[in-house]
Amino acid sequence: MSSRPLRPCAHPGCTELIRDGRYCLTHKPAPAADNNRPASQERGYDTRWVQVRTWWRKRHPMCEDCLSAGVVRRADLVHHIVPISAGGERYDHANLVSLCGPCHAKRHRGLGEGGSKV
């Protein structure tokens, strides 16, 4: 049994009491799923990619776009500058950049799957 105290659901007007998370089961947002998108391994993100990504993040732990703007923020992921689908090299260090979630979204905004502005 959890020892956390009960607290109200974060949904406005809901009086349901919960222990974990922000929302009750009624108001918990559905997970975002793209059922048409292939699994990561089917898209080529294999064991070697996991090793390269881990190595890169240890050496570049901060978001490089934020740093260039004078903001220090931890990176969430490793991004391919030239998308693999556009001929970018998957394991080439010159094609990698560490980004936080918001900066990654900015690079992909409005470009469709696999796009990049850089």
Image: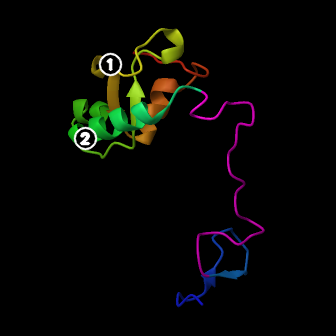
Residue 39 visible within the image: yes
Disc number placed over residue 71 in the picture, else none: 2
> Which mark is in front, 1 or 2?
1
Q: Is residue 82 left or right of residue 72?
A: right
Label 2 secondary element: loop
| Residue kind at label 1, given as amino acid type | Asp
Q: For the point 44% across and 41% down, which residue is it?
A: 101
Q: Which residue is mark 1?
A: 92
| The magenta segment | 19-42
| Residue kind at label 2, given as amino acid type | Val
Q: Residues within 10 Å of mark 1 (few under 14, many from 20)?
A: few
Q: Is residue 99 magenta?
A: no
Q: Is residue 36 magenta?
A: yes
Q: Is residue 113 left or right of residue 52?
A: right
Tell me: residue 27, above or below residue 39: below
Q: Nearer the viewer, residue 41 or 11?
A: 41
Q: Which mark is first along the chain, 2 or 1?
A: 2
Disc number placed over residue 114 in the picture, else none: none
Quarter holding the N terminus is bottom right
What colour scheme has been applied to the protein in the rendered image? rainbow
